[in-house]
Amino acid sequence: MDRLIVDNLRFRDRGPYSFAIAGGECLGLQGESGAGKTLLLRAIVDLDPHQGSLRLDDLECDRMPAPQWRKKVSMLPAESCWWLDVVAEHFHDFHTVSQEHLALLGFGPEVGGWQVSRLSTGEKQRLAILRMLENRPSALLLDEPTASLDQANSNGVEQLLGEYSRGNNAPLLWVSHDPQQLDRVADRCLFMQADGSLKPCGGE
Amino acid sequence: MGVKPLSAFDLSLAAGLVVALALCSWRLRLGLEKRMAISALRTTVQLLLIGQVLRVLFAHASFPFVFAISMVMLMVAGREVGARQHRRIKGVSGWLLGTGSMFVSSFAVAFFALAVVIANDPWYTPQYAIPLLGMLLGNTMNGIALSMDRLTESLWQQRQTVEQRLLLGQTSLEAIHELRQQAMRSGMIPIINSMAAAGLVSLPGMMTGQILGGSSPMDAVKYQILIMFLICAGTGFGVVTAITLTSRKLFDDRQRLRLDVLQKG
């Protein structure tokens, strides 16, 4: 169920990329800065022009409106953006966000009323995860989700995303610079070389 | 009762004032004297030329002639809209967006005013058609240039936020909703303000001209009110058209933000 299939994906001068992530599986992605990991994620959420086929099981990306695809296959960018004054205004309905999820990321229910301008980078990042999960995505693409977090908050994020993935049978593509983190969260791991090509982690 | 004609000597007296200002600019090292001289010269030459054109045009009030002149005016206004953008849409389509929006709004409003409101025979009587269209185009041009510049510039600066909203599943229109509103507002607010201030702060140029030309103040005022309404409608509809078309152009068929359609300068 709910496999994310990337088939012969090409964009700019990159690719072709072909891989699949099973439901509930986490694929780690490592690589040097500037190798194009973010570009790959952007192409998979259909934010950049590309060729090739993207599927969620038998649902074809090109067969549905792009906003619908982006709700199903959600990307968490490395830096989250907030455009309204108060946190809760960025959610469809902040009251439906589960208390356990909030607590797991170190927040109480009052965080919905907080001013965005007073959030720290780490707080924005953790809240962006909750905001993304509100769409109930079928697959998650995470661009360094814990880069700006301390160890305790990183653990909370890893636990939340892992539980979401297993509980909803959702494939995860997890970009990280931290090999130990990928050891913890990922079932297998790919390494992006400077030219953009992928190889299995650890192998020569 | 006609206007009292001005001689070349009369004009040179007024030009003396500009020369005095240029001297002042030189003393104060403002560095504006050269630009001032060129601009003063341009104003003289361009207006004398257009005077000749209008003289011929008024003598031969044929529709093709009036139409040709108005097309030239439109092309120049279209070029000006492009030139005023900090980042404009590349190629012919960018020019077509601004010019097309001006054409749709200005020409429709001008035709309505000439054929229905003023109802001369023939409706394209150039003494009415050309000044009316000129005022409409001039104001629509300002509004459209302002609003398009605002939209592309704010989109450029907030592209990360717009893409974040796309990532959350918003449609392209939802993601730039506020930016579109702001752009439309910034294009329309100048004319709304000048409607509010007309008569109290400023005596509009056309009304002043008519009064100088010997019309009764009440006649001049009524024409000015007509013009204000036309300019307001022309600018407003032009801005809405231009922003709608521009925001479509900035996204592709998969609702991706395509800032690569913009070029600087």
Image (cartoon, coloured by chain):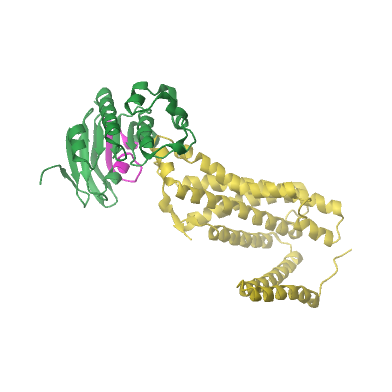
In the image, is residue B111 part of the stretch drawn in magenta? no
Name the spot of residue A103 as percent of width and height, x first.
34, 24
Q: Give me the chain that's yellow.
A: B
Q: Is residue B119 visible?
A: no
- Colour green maps to chain: A
User: Range of the magenta residues?
Assistant: A41-62
Between B169 and B105, the residue placed more toward the observer is: B169
Is residue B205 visible in the rendered structure shown here? yes
Task: Give B113 or A17, whichever is nearer the viewer.
Answer: A17
Kindly identify the residue that appears in the image at 34 percent across and 22 percent down.
A100
Q: Is residue A43 magenta?
A: yes
Q: Is residue B62 left or right of residue B258?
A: right
Residue A93 falls in image quadrant = top left
Give B208 or A126, whichever is nearer the viewer: A126
- Residue drawn at point x = 65 percent, y = 73 percent: B25
Question: Does residue A24 appear left or right of residue B172 in this picture?
Answer: left
Front one among A15 and A123: A123
In this view, the residue farthest toward the right is B1
Q: Quadrant of residue B58?
A: bottom right
Query: Which residue is most to the bottom?
Result: B9
Give the image location of residue B20, x and y in percent. Answer: 72, 75
Q: Quadrant of the N terminus of chain A?
A: top left
Residue B181: name its quadrant: top right
Instruction: Give percent across and percent down for residue B170.
Output: 43, 35
Q: Is residue B258 found left or right of B185 in the rendered image?
A: left
The percent position of residue A27, horizontal first and vertical second, equals: 21, 35
Q: How many marks?
A: 0
